[in-house]
Amino acid sequence: MSMKIYFLFLVFCFGAFWLLEVKAQSFSSSIPDQPDSNIRYLFYLHGGIVQEQGPNAVSPYYGEYAYQAILDTLVGRGFHVVSEVRPKDTDEKVYAVKLNNQIDTLIQQGVPDTNIIVVGASLGAYIALESSILNNNENIRFVLLGLCSAYALEYFQSFQRDFSGKFLSIYESSDSKGSCQRIFEGLQGHSSFQEIKLDMGIDHAFLYKPYPDWVNPLVFWIEE
């Protein structure tokens, strides 16, 4: 085989491999019509400022919410990411029902429940936790970023025995939205809870960009 033909062969193989990677690592605003049972589906629920301002949201306190960069980063870590910009007037409980319907559809079409992950940031984490109350599935993973304000703690403590799933809370020590430990003390069955405290010193802005500080432990926890 000549060097030229060998080089073309390598280019072809690399291209085929790249296409397979692109197929496996992708993004959509809703679940696919024909989901692949071998792919991990990650629902990303953005923070409230994106719901208010749109995908290019900027906070006067925390700066730009890098929504697209977050999606790209999660796709690059091997997930099929499902995410959409919620309308400004979205009712959180109604959206939690919509999310649950999508999860149920994936499972009915053959996707293992262990291949489904919900990542919620701030208001998105509120929706994720509402979804876990409705879902009653102990194998679905929920990652909660910057959720537990005093209001959230008081509200969700009344539901603590109804949570189902594997839960990871990630919070920043300088943020007023702190530990979620209190609301998960009454977990039943095979549901579980873990928590990570960050010390980045940037308040609620920690979830505005795909910082390795939260992305890496999130992926590690999912793959563990």
Image (spheres, rainbow, N blue to C red):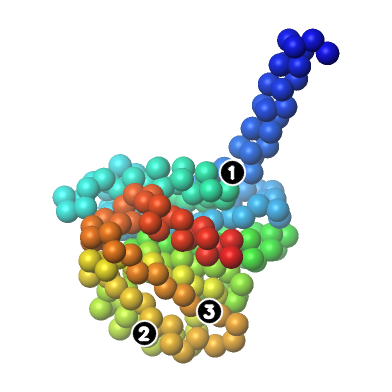
Residue at 43% over, 83% down: 184
Label 1 sits on what residue type? Answer: Gln
Q: Mark 2 near mark 1, Cβ–Cβ under 8 Å?
A: no
Q: Which residue is mark 3?
A: 192
Q: Secondary structure at mark 3?
A: strand
Q: Quadrant of the N terminus?
A: top right
Q: Position of residue 176 (x, y in %)?
A: 22, 70
Q: Secondary structure at mark 2?
A: helix
Residue closer to the observer: 224 or 59: 224
Mark 2 Cα shell of 10 Å, populated few (<14), some (14-19), many (≥20): few
Residue closer to the observer: 134 or 63: 63
Q: Position of residue 81 (x, y in %)?
A: 53, 50
Residue at 63% over, 61% down: 115
Q: Which residue is mark 2?
A: 182
Q: Mark 2 near mark 3, Cβ–Cβ under 8 Å?
A: no
Residue closer to the observer: 82 or 14: 14
| Left-right relation of 72 to 15 | left
Residue at 30% over, 57% down: 206
- CA–CA distance in space, label 2 to label 1: 36 Å
- CA–CA distance in space, label 2 to label 3: 13 Å
Q: Which of the 4 quarters of the picture holds residue 122?
A: bottom left
Mark 1 Cα shell of 10 Å, populated few (<14), some (14-19), many (≥20): many
- CA–CA distance in space, label 1 to label 3: 28 Å
